[in-house]
Image (cartoon, rainbow, N blue to C red):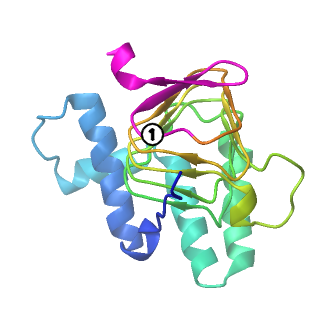
Amino acid sequence: MTRISTNYTCSFSLFDLLRLDVLRLYRLSHGAQAASPSCLLLWIYVLSPFMAPVLFYRISHYFQLRDMRLLAKICACLNSLLFGIEIASSCSIGPGLFIPHTHGTVIGAWSIGCNATIFQGATLGAKYLAFDFDRSSRPILGDNVTIGAGSKVLGGISIGSNSVVGANSVVLSDVPSDCVAVGVPAEIKLLSHYS
């Protein structure tokens, strides 16, 4: 499978990424056809329990990109202490990130595309103990990927765009686009069979 290449964080400013994250949350909660919210309402959404962990991650990643690793680490630690979620500062995540419940979630992927939804207790990271942040040992997720509660996506694998990893699944190999991965170890099924 061709490796997915996503590095959205270089294409957007910190403010743009946060605005797009909040807009996705707003549209998920009010429907895709909802009118655009006011600027004040967007800032209120930034402070919601759904967005605050994303805000801490975005700031942490912002510092990481500017080689201010101590500040990045402080933001990542605050995220872990306050919301029970660990997100690697080095992980590049596209706009529209949505994490409905944060506790027990570990995001140590190499990169994640836009409009990702990651449910509680999911783990995205290396298959073996790895202190370095190496692309060959970390998963890469495409756009519009949903990671179910309690699932594990481990190793240097790719999850294709528009795919779903079922709850409590363990994914150890590539998942093509438009597929569902379910089971332990995960089996790949076409998404059309679940529609």
Residue 94 screen position, x and y as percent: 43, 58
At 31% across and 58% down in the image, what residue appears? 19
Q: Residues within 10 Å of mark 1 (few under 14, many from 20)?
A: many
**Residue 77 in magenta?**
no
In the picture of the structure, the residue carrying the numbered disc 1 is: 145
Quadrant that contains the C terminus: top left
Residue numbers of the magenta segment: 175-195
**Residue 189 in magenta?**
yes
At 61% across and 36% down in the image, what residue appears? 102
Q: Is residue 172 left or right of residue 9?
A: right
Q: Quadrant of residue 152?
A: top right
| SS under mark 1 | loop
Residue closer to the observer: 114 or 177:
177
Q: Is residue 108 left or right of residue 143?
A: right
Question: In the picture shown, does residue 102 fall above or below 128?
Answer: above
At 44% across and 54% down in the image, what residue appears? 113
Q: Amino acid at mark 1?
A: Val
Question: In the picture shown, does residue 1 fall above or below 144?
Answer: below
Residue 187 screen position, x and y as percent: 61, 23
